[in-house]
Image (cartoon, helix red, strand yellow):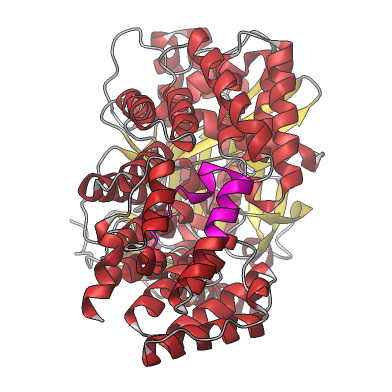
């Protein structure tokens, strides 16, 4: 009988990850029975090598193994033995090793060392055995032939890591080590690795300490995502976040392809009943961040995370994907695909189906997860380029214009490409840069998309936005409702619908759809800030500030959320707070902070003296928006000047320039002015009573 094992213990060990490269393709070629027999043989070989070299099997995930060793040298020899023994069977494996402190829970292991070993394995190719620098330092002088691959970014692991490839060792890769009993460390606990050189041991301990420090710093840094989404809520068993895939191509311009592939897989999974999928904006907010998998999963409220990489060269593409269990960092599934670009939709289907099977979600018989949207590969790549640039549209008007150009090329190459037409519609109805010229085109593009595919929720939402901008309330509501019926998880559609409802004074319904939008995509900061905006319109100022705080924890310079503090501070008489927020906004957007201080001082003086105050001469340098300047004039007790500015704004820019005027609390002093009521009536609006909530307390 083995001695009793503590329920949880921290020990030093070397972790080995292995998996079969190309297993999905082999399965499809061989059939279930032959593949099962080959996989059984694979397991026998791996377990035999683990026994020979003193390793202990922790778990097996389909075609992969996780094992632990007392020391790194036996682990390397074991990996070499596994690779060489499986070669004659036609099985190609890859392996990754890392040494450090792990947490042992019964028969399972966890901790950053386990996570790092998995990430080292993930950057390997067929037949490659990769080790971290920590392992290299511990086996220095051991006779292994190592090739320095340079620094690599390991997904979810802080900093860049030096990685080495093992070519061979001591001329006897298959020679058994002196260890005769498997996994002695499992019985001994912390005294393991006592035979390691003192300098090597120090490196292991130091690396663990530094990683722990980095993770703590990341948790304390308000700029990094925080686990707001999952707090206080049950995490669905079948739940996943799809992270943007790494672009491993020689050309950095191929980033669009890596992002697009991940987004298409996310979209396919989002339509699987019973599977919770984190929204795109929230998942992609972790791009180029050093957050680890558990942190990401907690922030997004999921149990598993899909990550991968794409290497594109000419007409060939290599895609590596792995599904990671966030709780213990172990791979539930991983695969590498080497294909022609023409097979890209087949690969998307295979990846999505493998994930569904790994998560044990039931699909309808014969149901396809990925449909080929176009027969033109060139059109598809133009579409991916366009979507990539559109997702960066807030960066510059140039990126927005370039997105439209690529999407227009996509529909030129394939006029029946419905998704590209819908993307064009999105780009036009959301344009801040080419509003007048784009809105009508947006309608045309959305209608063309719906001619080709009447069930595209995205196109219905874009058409709804078009009608909303034209104050055609019934038509807009019909399109929004149809969009959400087709795609209930379309967070942007929920927010657009919330704005429509708020403008009509239907605040309860508006708040419900704004809340859903924020919950569906909790790290899409514009959605969460939008929810705070609707709360302001409803007169629920404290709740609005609490929601804005969630955004400011992630991005202290988020101007829209700072605006929540600016507006609520003004109407609630928190003048110091409001001034600080407005001055910070001025600094962010590049306007005049001193002019903002002058405007704030004038509004505060009016609130205290209850009489009109002189208008600062530099009011025009506060914000570029004349609607906001008009609101400031109203709060200075200058209704005539405020109305003159609003009327001029309407004459020059049309109805849409005043679409939120009835909701803005800073324009509430004009609600009883017949000129204001008539101006809103002219465009089919009326002052909303909740915008006056603050005036009842004055």
Q: Is residue 638 left or right of residue 622?
A: left
Please state the horizontal and vertical placement of residue 4, each as a whole percent of the image: 19, 64
The magenta stretch spans residue 81: no
Q: Is residue 336 left or right of residue 673?
A: right
Residue at (46, 49) in percent of width and height:
282
The N terminus sits in image quarter: bottom left
Please state the horizontal and vertical placement of residue 43, each as a whole percent of the image: 42, 30
Q: Is residue 529 left or right of residue 81?
A: left
- The answer to whether residue 631 shows anywhere in this view is yes
Front residue (pair 653, 483): 653
Quarter of the figure with residue 411? top right
In the figure, 540 relative to 592: above or below? above
Residue at (33, 30) in percent of width and height:
477
Please state the horizontal and vertical placement of residue 639, each as a whole percent of the image: 46, 70
Quarter of the figure with residue 51? top left
The magenta stretch spans residue 658: yes
Front residue (pair 469, 606): 606
Front residue (pair 77, 305): 305
In magenta, the rendered stretch is 645-665
């Amino acid at each position: 009988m083995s001695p009793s094992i503590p329920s949880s213990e921290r020990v030093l060990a070397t972790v080995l990850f292995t998996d079969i490269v190309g297993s999905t393709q082999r399965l499809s070629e061989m059939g279930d029975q032959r593949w099962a027999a080959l996989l059984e043989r694979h397991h026998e070989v791996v377990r035999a090598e683990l026994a020979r070299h003193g390793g202990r099997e922790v778990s097996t995930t389909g075609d992969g193994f996780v094992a632990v060793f007392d020391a790194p040298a036996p682990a390397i020899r074991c990996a070499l033995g596994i690779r060489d023994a499986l070669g004659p069977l036609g099985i190609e494996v890859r392996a990754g090793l890392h040494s450090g402190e792990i947490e042992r829970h019964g028969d399972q292991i966890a901790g950053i060392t386990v996570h790092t070993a998995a990430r080292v394995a993930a950057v390997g190719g067929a037949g490659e055995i990769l080790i971290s620098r920590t392992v290299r330092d511990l086996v220095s002088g051991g006779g292994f032939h190592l090739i320095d691959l340079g620094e690599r970014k390991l997904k979810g692991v802080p900093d860049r890591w030096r990685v080495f490839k093992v070519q061979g060792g001591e001329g006897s890769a298959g020679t058994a080590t002196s260890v005769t009993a498997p996994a002695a460390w499992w019985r001994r606990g912390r005294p393991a690795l006592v035979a390691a050189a003192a300098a090597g041991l120090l490196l292991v301990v130091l690396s663990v300490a530094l990683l722990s420090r980095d993770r703590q710093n990341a948790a304390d840094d308000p700029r990094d995502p925080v686990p707001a989404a999952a707090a206080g809520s049950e995490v669905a068993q079948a739940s996943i976040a799809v992270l943007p895939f790494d672009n491993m191509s020689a050309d950095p311009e191929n980033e669009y392809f890596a992002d697009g592939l991940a987004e298409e897989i996310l979209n396919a999974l989002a339509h699987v009943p019973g599977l919770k999928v984190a929204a795109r904006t929230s998942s992609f907010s972790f791009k180029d961040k050093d957050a680890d998998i558990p942190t990401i999963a907690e922030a997004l409220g999921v149990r598993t995370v899909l990550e991968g990489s794409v290497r594109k060269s000419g007409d060939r593409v290599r895609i590596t994907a792995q599904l990671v269990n966030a709780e213990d960092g172990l791979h539930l599934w991983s695969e590498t695909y080497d294909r022609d670009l023409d097979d890209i939709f087949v690969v998307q289907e295979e990846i999505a189906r493998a994930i569904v099977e790994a998560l044990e979600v039931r699909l309808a018989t014969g149901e396809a997860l990925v449909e080929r949207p176009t027969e033109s590969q060139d059109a598809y790549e133009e579409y991916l380029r366009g979507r990539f640039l559109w997702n960066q549209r807030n960066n510059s008007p140039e990126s927005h214009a370039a997105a439209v150009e690529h999407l227009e090329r996509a529909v030129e190459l394939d006029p029946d490409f419905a998704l590209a037409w819908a993307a064009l519609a999105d780009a036009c109805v959301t344009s801040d840069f080419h509003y007048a010229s784009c809105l009508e085109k947006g309608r045309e593009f959305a209608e063309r998309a719906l001619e080709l595919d009447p069930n595209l929720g995205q196109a219905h939402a874009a058409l709804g936005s078009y009608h909303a901008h034209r104050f055609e309330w019934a038509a807009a509501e019909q399109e929004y409702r149809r969009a959400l019926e087709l795609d209930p998880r379309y967070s942007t559609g929920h927010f657009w619908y919330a704005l429509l409802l708020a403008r009509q004074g239907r605040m309860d319904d508006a708040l419900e759809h704004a809340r859903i939008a924020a919950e569906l995509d909790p790290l899409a900061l514009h959605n969460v800030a939008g929810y705070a905006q609707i709360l302001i319109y409803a007169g629920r100022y404290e709740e609005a500030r609490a929601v804005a705080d969630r955004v400011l924890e992630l991005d202290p310079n988020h101007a829209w959320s700072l605006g929540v503090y600016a507006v609520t501070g003004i109407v609630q008489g928190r003048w110091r707070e409001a001034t600080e927020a407005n001055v910070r906004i001025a600094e962010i957007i590049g306007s005049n902070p001193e002019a903002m201080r002058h405007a704030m001082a004038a509004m505060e003086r009016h609130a205290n003296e209850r009489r009109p105050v002189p208008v600062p001469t530099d009011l025009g340098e506060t914000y570029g928006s004349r609607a906001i300047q008009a609101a400031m004039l109203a709060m200075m007790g200058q209704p005539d000047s405020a109305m003159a500015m609003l009327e001029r704004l309407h004459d020059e820019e049309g109805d849409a320039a005043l679409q939120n005027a009835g909701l803005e609390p800073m324009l509430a002093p004009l609600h009883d002015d017949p000129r204001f009521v008539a101006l809103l009536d002219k465009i089919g609006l009326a002052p909303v009573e909740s915008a006056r909530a603050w005036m009842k307390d004055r």
